[in-house]
Image (cartoon, rainbow, N blue to C red):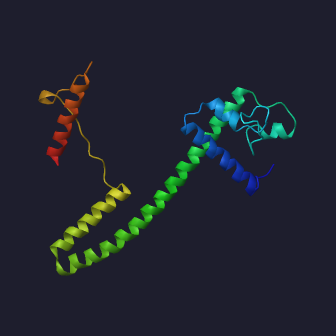
Amino acid sequence: MGRPDKAVRAAIAQRRADAIELRLAGVDWLTVARKLAADPAINSDHIAYPQGYGIERFRNGQEPPDDKQLVNTACRDVRFALRERSSEQEEKAEELRALENQRLDKLFFVAYRQAVKDGNLPAIDRALRIMERRARLLGLDQPARTEVTGAGGAAIEITNAALDELEALISITEEAARGSN
């Protein structure tokens, strides 16, 4: 069995999009699976959903999948579709990062030339800001390590802390981090 043709791939993509939309709307897995089933006998709308779950069984006149098989297929479908969407978003983000990097190259070239040629202090500052932006964009800077200690550098023991105690501790930590910058 080869790769499905364009129409079949489109129908499968639509089924996956429908499954995600149903789950986002709060529909339970079994209802999603039955709504997207190929066999009208088990489809909640009593239609043959195009490229629906159990399509091969329906075409071959076999018994439709049971509820557990339908739910497993719907879950697998949604996981696959979400993974696919995530990788598409990552690719788009990479393209945008590359474009932003090219823009920074052009801006840096101008600022760097003025900074080096004329010793222009504002141009030096601008070049440094562009370098900082590039480092953030590309994740070149190492994350700052923060260690929270108690009095005299001793470990802080937290057993059962109330929310206000944890918020106070976070506030102290944030203030200490700002003070070290």
For the residue pair 62 and 97, the one nearer the viewer reads as: 62
Q: Give the residue furthest to the left.
A: 152
Q: Give the residue furthest to the front.
A: 45
Q: Give the residue furthest to the top.
A: 160
Residue at 21 percent of width and 81 percent of height:
117
Residue at 71 percent of width and 52 percent of height:
9
- Indicate left or right for 166 with 105 as reference: left
Give residue 139's quadrant in the image: bottom left
Asked if 115 appears above or below 85 in the picture, the reply is: below
Asked if 84 appears above or below 170 in the picture, the reply is: below
Residue 174 horizontal/vertical position (percent): 20, 39
Give residue 102's quadrant in the image: bottom left
Residue at 79 percent of width and 36 percent of height:
40
Residue at 19 percent of width and 30 percent of height:
168
- Picture mark count: 0
For the residue pair 37 and 174, the one nearer the viewer reads as: 37
Residue 122 horizontal/vertical position (percent): 17, 72
- Indicate left or right for 92 with 60 as reference: left
Asked if 73 appears above or below 11 in the picture, the reply is: above
For the residue pair 104 and 119, the one nearer the viewer reads as: 104
Give residue 112's quadrant in the image: bottom left
- Indicate left or right for 9 with 146 as reference: right
Q: Give the residue furthest to the right.
A: 61
Residue 70 horizontal/vertical position (percent): 70, 32
Residue 4 horizontal/vertical position (percent): 76, 52
